[in-house]
Image (cartoon, helix red, strand yellow):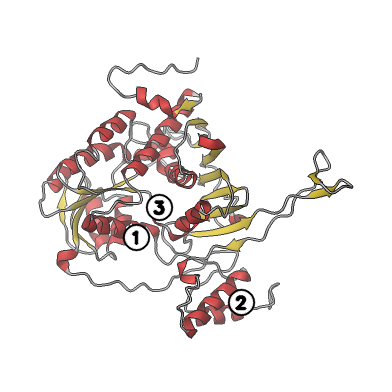
Amino acid sequence: MPDKNGITRRDAVKVAGATGVAFGFASAAGKGAPAILRSVHAANNQVPYGIIGTGGRGQYLLGLLKGVDTGRCLAICDVSDEALDKGKLAIGNSPKTYKDYRQLLADNSIEAVLIATPVYLHYPMLEDALNAGKHVFCEKSLVFTPEEVHKLRAIYPSQHQKQVLQVGLQRRYSEYYNMVKQMVDKGMLGDVKFMYGQWHRNPGWTMKPGNWRLFRKTSGGLAAELGSHHFDVADWMFGSTPEMVMGLGSLDTMFDGRDIFDNIQVIFKYPKGKKLIWSGSSTSSHLPLFGGTRAEQGELIAGTQGAVHITIGDGKMDPNPPVAIWFREPNPPKVSTGGKEEKFQAGASFALASGSKPLPILLSGDEMSGNENFVEKEMKFARRWLYSKNVMVPQEAKNPVTTALKHFFGDVRTGGTPRANYNVGLDDSISVIMANKAMDEERRVNFSELENIGKPGAAAVPKKA
């Protein structure tokens, strides 16, 4: 049966097949992606690495690293035999295994380490890895406490100028997020003043043995484990770091012995009147973006000339890869005053402006360079036609986490500076620390307070009476 656009799904499948791409209908993102041929690297050009922490996140990274031929896994480390076995299965070879991460760091055959342990262990392991002369990829948050902020500032980069330090904030490596950042910088969205981000789950984390994310002693809660990604996007898009944060956190639903909040809302104030509102909840996974066709997490980036809905997806690329759509700002309604000048109508009779049609954001593979041959040009026209009919949406062909890992090894070899570098990771960690402080103390927290927190002899900021 033809749809409202005058084409059938069978027609769409034929056209998409002719273009050599996978597609998804407007109601859901499509499955699959073009195959990516990997170049073959000589063994002596690969970065020999080890990974510390082979729990859930470590296993996920190892599964991706199996397809990254610029690195070679020599060793894995975890205190759990079960996690070590699963880590070996994920990477698919026979790396050396360690129970003590310091033994892995003492292995001179290892040039770089990846840290994927619980967040409260990140800084001690990071400091030891840097002192051992290793390049480091550390999952976020880079640091856990104000004291660690000051410690890291004291040693990096001054004492480790030649060592690469990259943080696991993969949106910096997403083609979509980089495209939107270009739109912001070029003024295509006008003056970007507002962002909304959320990560809602239902039910979210559940109590089970070893779930360190549920306790303040070992976890930064929803702000650290989920919100940090969106805090970083706001810093990136606004081009600055926050001045102040306020928020409300509570334990409303998950009464299972945890002591972190299961429901938080925070507001960050940035220079020049910019703001981020972020929400984390354990009661509903609904996402009020993309017409409700995606769930859990995403961001709205809004300016005076337009807005973007964007999400990194579920990290697995299938069935929910990164995607973004663009809405141009509709012209505000005007009324005639009987003269030459027109003014905005105000008051209770104000007429709402019509919404705008969602527009696909074209990725590099869809842009016309002028150097296409006939077949390439027809493929791009066909894809654009499907986009215009809301039958197909542009999708990233590469998982941004994989891209981030490839960049890490590339920067190790070239001495490059990561997109998610030390400054990015530290600023993000500070946002988490200050957001949690604002919720715990139920007050507005200025970021300038950090200079007097966690330093020997610093006076404590009084809590709200």
The residue carrying mark 2 is: 9
Is residue 312 in sight in this rendering?
no
Q: Position of residue 78 (x, y in %)?
A: 22, 47
Q: Which numbered tag is attached to residue 313?
A: none
Q: CA distance from mark 2 to mark 3?
A: 35 Å
Q: Pointer 1: what residue?
A: 402
Tell me the element at label 3. Answer: helix
Kind of residue sitting beneath label 1:
Thr
- Amino acid type of the residue that numbered disc 2 sits on in the rendered structure: Arg
Of labels 3 and 1, the one closer to you: 3
The answer to which image quadrant residue 193 occupies is top right
Residue 356 at what x, y percent from top left? 68, 58
Q: Nearer the viewer, mark 2 or mark 3?
A: 3
Q: Earlier in the sequence, mark 1 or mark 2?
A: 2
Q: CA distance from mark 3 to mark 1?
A: 12 Å
Tell me if 322 is positioned left or right of 409 in this view: right
Q: Is residue 120 visible?
A: yes
The answer to whether the residue labelled 3 contacts the one labelled 1, judged by CB atoms less than 8 Å apart, is no
Residue on which the image places disc 3: 172
Identify the image quadrant of the N terminus: bottom right
Which sits earlier in the primary sequence, circle 3 or circle 1? Answer: 3
Does residue 87 sit above or below 459 in this rendering?
Answer: below
- The amino acid marked with disc number 3 is Arg
